[in-house]
Image (spheres, rainbow, N blue to C red):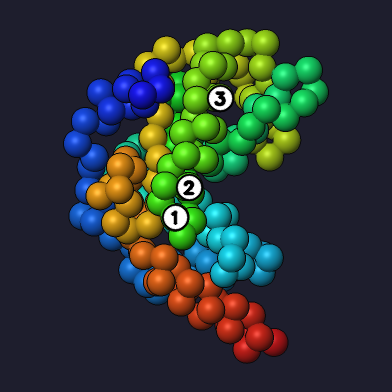
């Protein structure tokens, strides 16, 4: 077991159930329609899952700030991008990788690899963190107790993930279809 996985299991213990804060289909469709159409792809719908994940995490962490798409670079080279970052009092408390793939095993492996890479940069100021091109202070990532977790479709916790989205893969694909249809009827 990778070191960060053991820490993640210890920190998360039993996962909080996001079902108590379920996002309705209509709310999810509104979020999907707010995205550029290129993010509404039935084969690669990671960005939509990340946006839906922001809502789940916000509901589970009232008062916390949830960021999507924090990039980290060293010597001008991108090392990685963090799907969901939770801040409390300007300090990162959690980083969650959202992976929506047909295979939970492949999704978990990809998330584990990304979280393991990031874990090596926690507390280091030789790395530049930014959100939408705006640099973030490195001390925001200085918390040595940052919890690392994974999120996927609605039943993902049964497959070893820490968080579930409010929708299954089938429901996400239907959501994409509905949202794409609204683009053609909007004109």
Residue at 47%, 47% (x, y): give it: 107
Residue 70 picture location, percent across and down? 60, 35
Q: CA distance from mark 1 to mark 3?
A: 21 Å
Please report the residue visible at 66 percent of the width from the left and 86 percent of the height from the top. Answer: 184
Q: Are marks 1 and 2 in contact (CB under 8 Å)?
A: yes
Q: Is residue 89 found left or right of 67 in the rendered image?
A: left
The residue beneath circle 3 is 117
- Residue topped by disc 2: 106
Residue 49 seen in the current view: no
Residue 56 in percent (x, y) is at: 36, 51
Is residue 166 or residue 154 the one in the foreground?
A: 154
Q: Quadrant of residue 16?
A: top left
Q: 2 or 10: which is nearer to us?
A: 2
Residue 126 in view? yes
| Earlier residue among tags 1 and 3 | 1
Dot 2 or dot 3, earlier in sequence: 2
| Residue annotated with mark 1 | 103
The Cα–Cα distance between marks 2 and 3, rounded to whole angstroms, is: 17 Å
Q: Residue at x 50, y 64 (%)?
A: 31
The picture places residue 75, in percent across and down from the top left corner, at 78, 17
Please, is residue 72 above or below residue 17 in the view? Answer: above
Q: Position of residue 5 (x, y in %)?
A: 36, 26
């Amino acid at each position: 077991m990778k070191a960060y996985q053991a820490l993640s299991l210890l920190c998360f213990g039993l996962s909080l159930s996001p079902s108590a804060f379920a996002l309705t289909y209509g709310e999810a469709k509104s979020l999907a329609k707010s995205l550029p159409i290129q993010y509404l792809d039935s084969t690669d719908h990671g960005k939509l899952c990340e946006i839906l994940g922001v809502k789940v995490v916000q509901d589970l962490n009232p008062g916390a700030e949830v960021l999507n798409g924090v990039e980290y670079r060293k010597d001008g080279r991108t090392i990685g991008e963090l799907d969901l970052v939770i801040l409390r009092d300007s300090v990162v408390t959690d980083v969650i990788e959202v992976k929506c793939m047909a295979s939970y095993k492949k999704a978990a492996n990809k998330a584990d690899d990304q979280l393991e890479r990031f874990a090596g940069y926690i507390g280091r100021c030789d790395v530049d963190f930014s959100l939408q091109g705006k640099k973030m202070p490195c001390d925001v990532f200085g918390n040595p107790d940052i919890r690392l977790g994974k999120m996927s479709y609605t039943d993902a916790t049964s497959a070893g993930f820490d968080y579930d989205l409010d929708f299954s893969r089938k429901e996400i694909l239907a959501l994409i279809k509905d949202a794409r249809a609204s683009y053609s009827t909007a004109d």
